[in-house]
Image: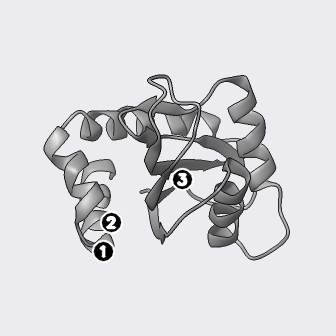
C-alpha cells in the first residue's frame, strides 16, 4: 500500500524551495529529506519531460512507501530532459532498507502518465479526485 499526499503550490523559485515544501509535508521535524532529494538531482535530473518530474529517494522519515503529488500553478525550471518547465511533481519516498520498492511504484506511475488525457486531468482536476486516481492506479 502506498501512502498518497498532495500539495498545490502557487509558485516555487527553486528545487530547494520545492524540496523543502515536500519535506515539511512529510514531517515538520528538521530532517534530511530535502538534502537527499537534492543529492539525487545532482546525479541526473528527475525532470522526465512534458512538464513532469519524478524525484525519488530513501528516507528514515517514512515507514511506508509514500508518493507526494505536487501541482505547481506556475511551472518551474527543473533541468528536464526536454528542457520544458515542470508543473507536475510526483515525489516518491521509500523507507530505508526497502530501496527496491521504488521501482514498481515508478513503473506503475510511468504507466499512468503515458495517458495524455490523465496528465491533463492532473493539471486541471481537484486534488482529492487526483489522490483517488493515484491510489487506484498505484495500489
- What residue sits 60% from the left and 50% below the top? 93
Q: Is residue 131 left or right of residue 22?
A: left
* Frontmost residue, 30 versus 51: 51
Image quadrant where residue 106 sits: top left
- What mark, if any, has residue 128 been given in the picture? 1
From this viewpoint, is residue 71 visible? Answer: no
Q: Quadrant of residue 11?
A: bottom right
Q: Earlier in the sequence, mark 3 or mark 2?
A: 3
Residue 29, position in %: x, y?
A: 81, 74
Name the residue at 70% across, 59% down.
17
Query: In whole angstroms, how far apart are the C-alphas of marks 3 and 2?
Result: 15 Å
In this picture the colour scheme is one colour
- Left or right? Give the position of 75 relative to 31: left
SS at mark 3 in the image: loop
Q: Secondary structure at mark 2?
A: helix
Examine the rendered structure and indicate whether residue 97 appears above or below residue 114. Answer: below
Of discs 1 and 3, which sits in the foreground?
Answer: 1
Circle 3 is placed at which residue position? 65
Cα separation, mark 1 vs mark 2, equals: 5 Å
Left or right, 17 with reference to 64: right
Height in image: 75 above or below 127? Answer: above
Give the class, few, some or many, for how many residues have Cα within 10 Å of label 1's Cα (few <14, many ≥20). Answer: few
- Asked which secondary structure carries label 1, the reply is helix
Q: Position of residue 134 (x, y in %)?
A: 31, 56
* Sequence order check, earlier mark of 1 and 3: 3
Q: Which residue is painted at 40% across and 40% down in the image?
A: 51
Q: Position of residue 129 (x, y in %)?
A: 24, 70
Q: Which residue is pictured at 65% across the width and 66% down the height?
A: 21
Q: Which of the image's four quarters has the N terminus?
A: bottom left
- The reply to whether dot 1 and dot 2 touch (C-beta < 8 Å) is yes
Q: Residues within 10 Å of mark 3 (few under 14, many from 20)?
A: many
For label 2, the residue is 131
Amino acid at each position: 500500500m502506498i501512502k498518497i499526499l498532495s500539495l498545490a503550490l502557487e509558485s516555487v523559485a527553486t528545487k530547494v524551495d520545492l524540496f523543502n515544501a515536500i519535506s515539511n509535508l512529510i514531517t515538520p521535524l528538521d530532517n534530511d529529506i530535502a538534502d537527499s532529494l537534492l543529492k539525487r538531482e545532482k546525479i541526473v535530473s528527475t525532470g522526465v519531460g512534458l512538464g513532469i518530474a519524478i524525484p525519488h529517494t530513501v528516507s528514515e522519515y517514512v515507514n511506508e512507501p509514500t508518493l507526494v503529488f505536487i501541482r505547481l500553478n506556475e511551472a518551474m525550471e527543473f533541468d528536464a530532459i526536454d528542457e520544458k518547465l515542470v508543473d507536475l511533481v510526483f515525489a516518491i519516498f521509500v523507507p530505508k532498507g526497502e530501496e527496491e520498492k521504488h521501482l514498481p511504484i515508478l513503473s506503475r506511475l510511468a504507466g499512468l502518465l503515458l495517458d495524455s488525457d490523465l496528465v491533463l486531468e492532473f493539471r486541471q482536476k481537484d486534488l482529492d479526485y487526483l489522490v483517488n486516481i493515484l491510489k487506484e492506479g498505484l495500489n
